[in-house]
Amino acid sequence: MGETRCIGRSASPGVAIGTLFVLETAIAGRRGTGTPEQEDTALGDAIEVAKAELAELIGQAEGEAADILSFQVAMLEDEELAAPARAEIAGGVAADLAWRNALDAQIADYAASDDEYFRARVSDLADIRDRVLQHLSGAQVQALPGGAVIAAEDITPSRFLSHDWKSGGAIVLSKGSPSSHVAMLARARHVPMVVGVDFDTAKLKPGAPAIVDGAAGVIILDPEAESHQAARTRVADDKRLAAEAQHFLKRPAVTGDGSAVAIYINVASPDELAEIDPAICDGIGLVRTELLFHGHHGLPDEEQQHGAYKRILDWAAGRPVIVRTLDAGGDKPIPGLTIEESNPFLGLRGLRLSLKRPEVFRTQLRALCRAAVAGELKIMLPMVTVPAELAEARAHLDAVVVELAQAGIAHRRPPLGIMVEVPSVAVTPERFAADFFSIGSNDLTQYVMAAARDLNSVAHLADTGNPAVLALITRVAAQGAARGIEVSLCGDAASDPALVPHLLRCGLRKLSAAPAAVGRVKAAIAGIDLRS
């Protein structure tokens, strides 16, 4: 028999050659084994174990992966999520059935919502549902073999993150979306992925040879010799490009015409720095502090934050470190701090929330000022919209500095900069008396283009390379140059080698990328001649 080609949609580029592994998605039920009180306890225990597992995964994750898992922890910590299940249990329903009913109803509500934000959270709810059900049923999670082509209807974010993809492999789904969380994670880890493939997973042959072309959105089952050879050539080309990236990894970033470019990295916690060599970068351009606020014992106190910031500065060894103050809200809820809103991306998030909760904001500022003694720390404010917000934040920082001085506590007042991610700032940057600017390309792009970057229906519009977005980046870079203010970019665009030439031609010379992208970004910079 000849080969079979199945067509889907590209979710993550790259080519993989492997054997099929069909992922089971159904979770067996269980019989209620106790009183309503015992069943309620069983549900509570399963939720706690699920939270602990997610916390462990967060410690191994970075960037968007950590944000996704933190969102799931926040949902599990919300007692309202389990309230309908507990009500059914009190009426005699088994814990697993009650939990499944409650989460399925919530998933249906989210899927039917008019708000795109809630529809985008469906996969997270399914992930939470299945993880708790596994602990209630005692089911063993299928081990995913290294290097295999994983075929399924869908795959959850935590399942993806629990697998080691270093040995290769790919994902092909009959459902799924190119804008899903798993697709974003696959792209960040260079795992080829195709979604919406027209096949019945129950009819696939586990162990059969397969080729996945993520860029073309094609999976070849039982490939013929010619297809095998073409795939091997593509894989060899990808390895060559990866080797080039490795060659540039610890070298200074310099364009072909000799222009130096500073390359920083984005991080979310001190833990993820353990396996990163400081020699690959010029410093840290973005420390996302949200992860510190997702602990199981309430919001972190000053000492906990101070310790985390100092560990990051010690790693940087004198290199600049830009710490973003808490950017909660939007798709990053934090129990006890954020509030539910109909449109969270346009609501009380970032600095807006910090100014409404000055006791939380000042605790973070105190910890940052104390940590600044150990290195070159800078404070960055997220979601600034009007100059008055910057002025109010600066007043809080001034007050904290006075408090620390009066108490005789060692400290240093760090420079205070802002993220440029709201069009009102990018259009008139001259109105903002910040010590530095850092362009957040993700939010700036979606606000300028009125298109969420994680929604497939408008993904083609959420393009940082659009002339409208590039014009604003150019405007901010020019304003910084005119006023002698440092301007960098710390969004996803800095990790995309295809966008780097555009960013440099906008006038930027400081980029902050994902650690895994540094080599590829430096290689791309070496091939750019800004004179042409």
Image (spheres, helix red, strand yellow):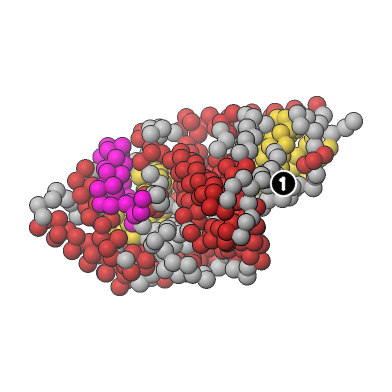
Q: Can residue 261 be seen here?
A: no
Task: Please indicate whether residue 396 sits to the left or right of residue 520 in the image.
Answer: left
Residue at 29% x, 49% y is 305
Task: Please indicate whether residue 371 sits to the left or right of residue 176 in the image.
Answer: left
* 356 vs 285, nearest the viewer: 356
Q: Can residue 374 be seen here?
A: yes
Image quadrant of residue 356? bottom left
Is residue 152 one of those drawn in magenta? no
* 78 vs 162, nearest the viewer: 78
Please state the extent of the stretch shown in magenta in the rendering: 297-325
Residue at 25% x, 48% y is 303
Rendered position, 282 above or below 460:
above
Image quadrant of residue 259? top left
Residue at 58% x, 51% y is 35
Whole-percent x and y of residue 414? 23, 54
Q: Amino acid at mark 1?
A: Glu
* 243 vs 189, nearest the viewer: 189
* 332 vs 18, nearest the viewer: 332
Residue at 68% x, 51% y is 176
- Check disc 1 and report the residue beneath it: 153
